[in-house]
Image: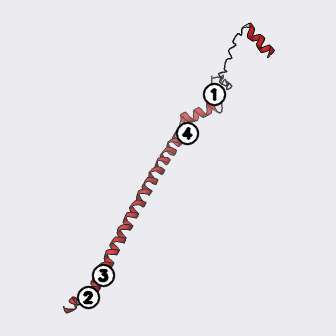
Amino acid sequence: MRILYSPLAALIITGIVGVICVSLYMNGRRIQQSALTVQKMEVEVASIEAKVNLVERNALEATSSTAKERIFRDELLLQKPGEFVVQIPDQPLPSAKPTQTVTSLRPWQQWQQLLF
């Protein structure tokens, strides 16, 4: 019992308590870093799941019978019995051309333009 009251024992106990406190602090920091990493990975997984859902939906649409028929009719120009396929060429849209307004000049202004 006398050993506990010596200064050497107090120093050793203080050292052990210090090591435990530092260890707890380091573990707390690791837990915080792990939580941030998990949060980043959850966001990444959510975005990848959204992309996968979009690709699956597009794949289902592309393999549906209506999509196949649309491809057959539009791109391959196939027809059902009794139908006639008429392909209309793409026509460019008419562009709006600026109209030039002709202002009538007075006779003296016409002479002025001719001479100068």
| Residue position marked by numbered label 2 in the rendering | 9
Mark 1, residue position: 79
Q: CA distance from mark 4 to mark 2?
A: 78 Å
In the rendered image, which residue does mark 3 sit on? 16
Residue 13, image quadrant: bottom left
Indicate the position of residue 49 as horizontal and vertical percent values. 46, 50
For marks 4 and 1, the one nearer the N-term is 4
Q: Mark 4 or mark 2: which comes first in sequence?
A: 2
| Residue shown at the point (37%, 65%) measured from the top left | 31
Residue 1, compared with residue 32, is above or below; it is: below
Q: Amino acid at mark 4?
A: Ala
Horizontal and vertical percent position of residue 98: 66, 20
Mark 1 lies on a secondary structure that is: loop
Crowd rating for badge 3 (residues with CA inside 10 Å; few <14, some 14–19, many 20+): few
The type of residue carrying mark 3 is Ile
**Above or below — where is 68 with respect to 96?**
below
> Is 63 or 47 nearer to us in this picture?
47
Left or right: residue 31 versus residue 84 is left
Q: Amino acid at mark 2?
A: Ala
* Residue 109 locus on image (x, y percent): 74, 11
Residues under labels 1 and 3: Cα distance?
88 Å
At label 2, counting other C-alpha atoms closer than 10 Å, the crowd grade (few under 14, some 14-19, many 20 or more) is few
Q: Which of label 4 and label 1 is nearer to you?
A: 4
Residue assigned mark 4 = 62
Tag nearer the camera, 1 or 3: 3
Q: Earlier in the sequence, mark 2 or mark 1?
A: 2
Q: Is residue 85 above or below residue 3?
A: above
- Measure the C-alpha gap from mark 4 to mark 1: 20 Å
